[in-house]
């Protein structure tokens, strides 16, 4: 039941973390040197997702500086509204499945974002 194909599909080669020769980009201890330590990232959770979306909405409202430049963000109200709408969808789709703390975080964030959106539109 095997079928031979005359055409070959595409091939994906992941070169992240590799140097130009295909070896590890972080050298192992050569001459007593150690590789730089890896960063420990916190485990993603629901609160991190909600806070991330909230930060994005605040940026689009022009209320927080651009992390890359440190300069104040330029308000983009349609994009802010879209991000707030995403948080609302998240609230709707997770209703009844959140811990009381997660539910409170989501509700508080939405209330704050909605009020700031109204203020930004004045």
Image (cartoon, rainbow, N blue to C red):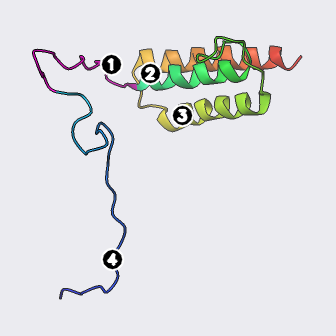
Q: Main secondary structure of the magenta part?
A: loop
Q: Bounds of the magenta span?
A: 28-45
**Residue 81 appears left or right of 35:** right
Q: Is residue 21 above or below residue 45?
A: below
Residue 8 is labelled as 4
Q: Nearer the viewer, mark 1 or mark 4?
A: 4
- Eye-nearest disc, 3 or 2: 2
Q: Residues within 10 Å of mark 3 (few under 14, many from 20)?
A: few
- Label 4 environment density (alpha carbons within 10 Å; few <14, some 14–19, many ≥20): few
Residue 85: which quarter of the image? top right
x and y percentages locating residue 31 in the rendered image: 10, 18
Q: Which residue does the image show at 67% across and 19% down from the upper left?
A: 59
Where does the N terminus fall, quadrant-wise?
A: bottom left
Residue placed farthest to the right in the image?
122
Confirm or deny contact between disc 3 and disc 2 (CB under 8 A): no
**Mark 1 vs 4, N-terminal side:** 4
Residue at disc 1, secondary structure: loop
In space, the residues marked 3 and 4 are separated at their CA atoms by 41 Å
- Mark 3–mark 1 Cα distance, whole angstroms, equals 22 Å
For the residue labelled by badge 2, is the local secondary structure a helix, a strand or a loop? Answer: helix
Pick out the residue farthest to the front: 31
Q: Earlier in the sequence, mark 3 or mark 2?
A: 2
Helix, strand or loop under label 4:
loop
Which residue position is annotated with label 3? 90
């Amino acid at each position: 039941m095997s079928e031979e194909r005359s055409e070959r599909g595409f091939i994906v080669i992941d070169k992240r973390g590799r140097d130009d020769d295909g070896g590890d980009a972080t050298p192992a201890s050569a001459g007593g040197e150690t590789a730089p330590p890896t960063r420990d990232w916190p485990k993603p959770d629901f609160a991190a997702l909600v806070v991330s979306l909230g930060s994005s909405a605040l940026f689009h409202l022009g209320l927080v500086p651009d992390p890359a430049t440190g300069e104040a963000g330029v308000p983009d109200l349609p994009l802010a509204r879209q991000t707030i709408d995403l948080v609302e969808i998240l609230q709707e789709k997770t209703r009844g499945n959140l811990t009381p703390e997660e539910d409170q975080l989501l509700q508080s964030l939405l209330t704050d974002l909605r009020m700031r959106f109204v203020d930004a539109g004045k």
